Amino acid sequence: YFTSTSIKVKNFIVLYIGLLIGASMGVLMPLWTTLAILIGISFWDLFAVLYKHGPIKQMIDLVSEPKEDHNKLSDEEMKEKIQSGEYAYDTSKLEIGIGDLAFYSMLTSSTLVQTGNVIIMILTSLAIMIGTGITIMGLKRNKILPGLPISIFLGIGTMLLSWYLFSLPF
């Protein structure tokens, strides 16, 4: 992994490892443990990213400390240029962590194992993807956002609601 120069090979390996770890945890753990871990990690992600003394927030602030550059645009000027179409919002630098992939995979595999229903698993996966899309859209307004909470809470809600609805006698 570390010796490969191809970014595609590295991305594939990270994706594979994340999905394998998450799927293994989702299959091996009981539902209550899976849900407790996912909810706990989601709250930790909120704290770590959004709280001013959170560890990830501090790292981001440290890395992005403003350097003295007189040619830099103010936030207002930047917003005007983006809205006018002069500048485009660049999503090519978006990254998703291996942990996020593992937890998304954990919820999806746990859903399939616990419910035994592929449709519920697909609905849960779609909810996770919608949550990820909402998070990405939120990045237009914020420099950094936690990747887990919206996706995980939408996924858990969809899983539980779908499971309940599919268990109703018709």
Image (cartoon, rainbow, N blue to C red):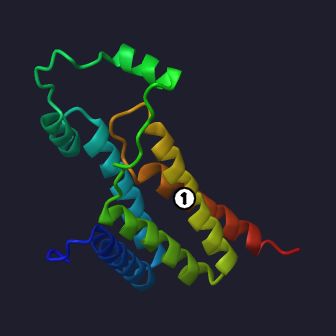
Horizontal and vertical percent for residue 122? Answer: 63, 71
Quadrant housing residue 97:
bottom left
- Relative to residue 102, is residue 69 drawn left or right? left
In the picture of the structure, the residue carrying the numbered disc 1 is 129
Quadrant housing residue 32:
bottom left
Q: Helix or strand or loop: what does disc 1 sit on?
A: helix
Residue plotted at (48% across, 70% down): 107
In this picture, is 138 found above or below 87? below
| Number of marks drawn | 1
Residue 77 visible in rendering: yes
- Relative to residue 158, is residue 97 drawn left or right? left
Extreme residue toward the right, this view: 170
Disc 1 marks a residue whose amino acid type is Met
Extreme residue toward the front, this view: 86
Mark 1 Cα-neighbour bin, 10 Å: few <14, some 14–19, many ≥20: some
Looking at the rendering, in which quadrant would you find the C terminus?
Answer: bottom right
Quadrant housing residue 90:
top left
In this picture, is 88 found above or below 47? above
**In-front residue for pair 16/49:** 16
Residue plotted at (45% across, 72% down): 105
Residue 159 visible in rendering: no
Horizontal and vertical percent for residue 116? Answer: 63, 84
**In-front residue for pair 145/67:** 67
Looking at the rendering, in which quadrant would you find the N terminus?
Answer: bottom left
Horizontal and vertical percent for residue 137? Answer: 50, 41
Residue plotted at (37% across, 42% down): 145
**In-front residue for pair 90/63:** 90
Horizontal and vertical percent for residue 108? Answer: 52, 72
